[in-house]
Amino acid sequence: MPPKIVEVIEGGVCTACGACEAVCPVGAVHVELEADRRDPNNLTYYVHGAACEVCEDCLTCSRICPVADGFPEDEFDNLRSFRGGKSEQLQGQDGAVVSTILKSLFEQGEIDCAVGIKRDENWGVKPFILTKASDVDLSKGTKYTSVPVLAQLKEAMKKYNKIAVVGVPCQAHAATLMRDSMTDRIVLVIGILCMESFTDEALCGNIIPNIMGLDIKKVVKMDFGGGKFWAYTKNGNGEEPEPHSVPIKEVAPLARNPCHHCLDYTAYYADISVGSVGAPDGWNSVIVRNEIGENYLNKVKGIVYDDDPKPGMFLIKKLADQKHKNNAPKEGEAH
Ligand SMILES: Cc1cc2nc3c(=O)[nH]c(=O)nc-3n(C[C@H](O)[C@H](O)[C@H](O)COP(=O)(O)OP(=O)(O)OC[C@H]3O[C@@H](n4cnc5c(N)ncnc54)[C@H](O)[C@@H]3O)c2cc1C
Ligand code: SF4
Ligand code: SF4
Ligand code: SF4
């Protein structure tokens, strides 16, 4: 029987999280940068007949695929705490809570590796392995392009014993399945809230230049907020970034196909979930979901908290509801 990931891939709902590539013992799977633009020659399963030649039917990938595992019934039934948080020193996408957690845990020797994403001046994205506190600065900031971050774990699991994973909900889910079923080297899973992500072609090849009329090289930050997608440009040093926006409804339909089927907004399976919605500008919403998350967060230095951030949890729940309604399986459709 072929592994379940074949169904996921052929059904067009593979999130390109990269986990199957990390765990496959015989290298039968290679996940390209974006699932929607896979090069058939780089994905063994798409080469006619190769699956049965290469795959050994161990079914490890079936156990760690987040889509095959399914979505949570109630993504708010494991909230241990909810607070606003902000770094005392670091700059990041919002309050830099993610960067501060990583940096502080590296400095204390609590983690020896983390997987993250960096970008170049054209917003080309690349997953990479962080091994020290000074690497954290390279990964800061949100990239709305999808990257198979977890494929990095193949190398990381050979060399490191205390790995932190940072990823969007599908990636956090897969990392937790890996920890539950096959490795004790992943010690912390930080999930970031996510409504959708894009291919590089859609974001940097269409939305930024065509829909917004901007030069990608001048963009210093992208963000969602107040019903709009924002891109901030800078022309020279010392200049305040200039905001540009389009209504979300103009860009959301261009999100990747798996995102239109995804029913996890808040990274239910993570130890700690971090987002921007629910907290004031420049702050993060910080949700602790289990004892592992609580123990690690208690060790982190350099975050200030607000126990009652505004607008608060109601807005996170409202957007999660919206995601569930938009993406619920239509009648007769397999999910
Ligand atoms: C695709 C996407 C969609 C998002 N949608 C929402 C949303 O709808 N609502 C909401 O509240 N928050 C959303 N976020 C989260 C938000 O943008 C911030 O990432 C989060 O608030 C953490 O902020 P920070 O200041 O702590 O991050 P920083 O300290 O700047 O750290 C950012 C971290 O995110 C990682 N990262 C960046 N891009 C990606 C990526 N594409 N895939 C995996 N990891 C990545 C980096 O490696 C780094 O570790 C989204 C993030 C992404 C990547
Ligand atoms: S079943 Fe095993 S050998 Fe086959 S693709 Fe999955 S992990 Fe690789
Ligand atoms: S494990 Fe991730 S990359 Fe592999 S098939 Fe499942 S969703 Fe796609
Ligand atoms: S919407 Fe879902 S599938 Fe798409 S990147 Fe976010 S968590 Fe992954």
Image (spheres, helix red, strand yellow):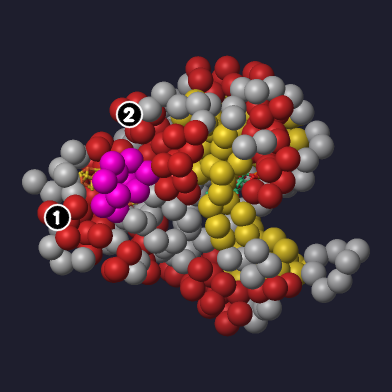
Residue bounds of the magenta highlight: 19-29
Task: Name the residue rendered at 48%, 58% in the picture.
Answer: 146
Q: In terms of depth relative to the viewer, which is nearer, 332 or 130?
A: 130
Residue drawn at 8 percent across, 46 percent down: 1
Task: Report x, y in % for residue 22.
Answer: 37, 44
The 10 Å Cα crowd at callout 1, few under 14, some 14 to 19, many 20 or more, is few
How many other residues sit within 10 Å of disc 2, few (<14), some (14-19) or many (≥20)?
some
Q: Which residue is mark 2?
A: 182
Tell me the quarter of the picture where residue 286 sits.
Answer: top right
The answer to whether any part of residue 238 appears in the image is yes
Please say if 4 is above or below 231.
above
Task: Assess whether residue 157 is covered by the magenta stretch.
Answer: no
Residue placed at 42% from the left, 48% from the top?
151
Q: Callout 1, which amino acid?
A: Glu
Residue 138's spot in the image, x, y percent? 68, 50
Q: Which residue is under mark 1? A: 53
Please name whichever residue, 145 or 120, is drawn nearer the observer in this view of the structure: 120
| Quadrant where ligand 2 appears | top left
Percent position of residue 323, x then y: 42, 51
* Residue 311 visible to an observer of this rendering: no
> Under tag 1, what secondary structure?
helix
